[in-house]
């Protein structure tokens, strides 16, 4: 029975593969940190073409990398939820401003068509404080 050579050893029919187990490990580490394909390839010291060629040869590797890229988002959601559960008011305000924009956002989003005529309005410090007080009161009364 003939012994197979590990991938990192030279192939008698061509040059050795750059996609060693260590390179694959570095790619996975990079994607788990939320790196883009460009940055993960730089991190693993390979070209994007090498990455895509490997993805074509290794079934499921592309999907695995896409899944790993989502890990930082999942971690951030867990951190936000932990802060909310601990009663962190600044996180609660931040979260409400993004998830319930109509009620809590300090910005107004407007859709339009046609010519744009606009006027810039500055909010005075007192008005800003009134908005913040409203948000705090709403959050505290939600319990």
Image (cartoon, rainbow, N blue to C red):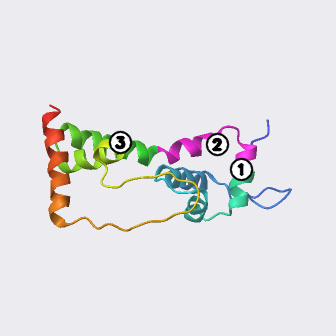
Q: Which residue is drawn at 13% across and 35% down?
A: 141
Is 72 within the magenta? no
Q: Which of 139 and 30 is in front in this view?
A: 139
Per the rendered image, the range of residues in magenta is 55-70
Q: Which of 27 and 34 is in front in this view?
A: 34
The tag on residue 54 is 1
User: Residue 107's quadrant in the figure?
Assistant: bottom left
**Element under disc 1:** helix
Residue 118 in the image: state x and y as whole percent. 44, 65
Question: Which label's residue is closer to the chain start, 3 or 1?
Answer: 1
Left or right placement of residue 66 versus residue 13 in this view? left
Q: Main secondary structure of the magenta part?
A: helix
**Element under disc 3:** helix
Question: CB atoms at circles 2 and 1 under 8 Å apart?
Answer: yes
The tag on residue 99 is 3
The vertical placement of 112 against 83, above or below, is: below
Left or right placement of residue 50 versus residue 44 in this view? right
- State which mark lies toward you, 3 or 2: 3
Q: Which residue is tagged 2?
A: 61
Residue 139 in the image: state x and y as whole percent. 18, 40
From mark 3 to mark 1, how far is it between C-alphas?
Answer: 39 Å
Q: Please indicate, yes or no, whether residue 9 appears anywhere in the rendered image.
A: no
How many residues crowd around disc 2 within 10 Å: few (fewer than 14), some, or many (20 or more)?
some
Question: Which label's residue is closer to the chain start, 2 or 1?
Answer: 1
Q: Residue at x 75, y 45 (%)?
A: 56
**Element under disc 2:** helix
- State which mark lies toward you, 3 or 1: 3
């Amino acid at each position: 029975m003939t012994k197979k050579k590990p991938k990192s050893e030279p192939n008698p029919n061509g040059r050795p593969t750059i996609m060693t187990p260590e390179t694959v490990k570095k790619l996975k580490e990079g994607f788990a940190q939320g790196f883009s394909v460009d940055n993960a390839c730089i991190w693993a010291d390979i070209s994007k073409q090498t990455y895509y060629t490997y993805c074509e040869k290794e079934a499921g590797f592309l999907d695995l990398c896409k899944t790993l890229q989502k890990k930082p988002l999942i971690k951030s959601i867990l951190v936000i939820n932990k802060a909310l559960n601990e009663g962190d008011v600044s996180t609660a305000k931040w979260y409400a401003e993004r998830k319930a924009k109509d009620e809590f956002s300090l910005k107004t989003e407007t859709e339009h068509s046609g010519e744009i005529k606009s006027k810039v309005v500055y909010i005075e410090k007192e008005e800003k404080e009134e908005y913040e007080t409203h948000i705090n009161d709403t959050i505290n009364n939600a319990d």
